[in-house]
Amino acid sequence: MKRMSEFYFDVNKWEEDIAQQHEQEESGSGKKRKRPTKKDLVSAFNRFDSDGPLNDFLCFQERFKEQKRLKKIAKTAWLRT
């Protein structure tokens, strides 16, 4: 199978690339960036005063919660009829 694949593809180069990827993952340099959690975002906004960005953030957060609640109600409306 490898011999047949070598006719169409550069199998040796592909195997080398895979080996390099495994080495990078093991060394830790190839790790992806950790995404911030909701807790991290709220703690970052707590550094500002309460009249500024934090207040805006909480308003957005409540608005999204309300939209989610309405969406859930709309999905299950057929159960109430």
Image (cartoon, rainbow, N blue to C red):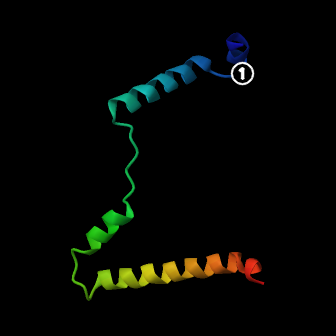
Instruction: Quadrant for the C terminus, please.
Output: bottom right
Q: Which residue is more in the foreground, 13 or 54?
A: 54
Q: Is residue 62 above or below residue 7?
A: below
List x then y, in percent, for residue 8: 71, 21
Neighbour tally class for label 1: few under 14, some 14-19, many 20 plus, Cα within 10 Å: few
Q: Secondary structure at mark 1?
A: helix
Figure quadrant of residue 77 = bottom right
In-image side of 56 versus 66 (left or right): left
Residue in view at x 63 percent, y 76 percent: 72
Figure quadrant of residue 22 = top left
Q: Which residue is more in the foreground, 64 or 2?
A: 64
List x then y, in percent, for residue 5: 70, 18
As shown in the figure, which amino acid type bears the numbered disc 1?
Tyr
Q: Which residue is more in the foreground, 49 or 33?
A: 49
Residue in view at x 37 percent, y 51 percent: 34
Can you name the residue that lies furthest to the top here?
3
Q: Is residue 14 above or below residue 62?
A: above
List x then y, in percent, for residue 71: 63, 78
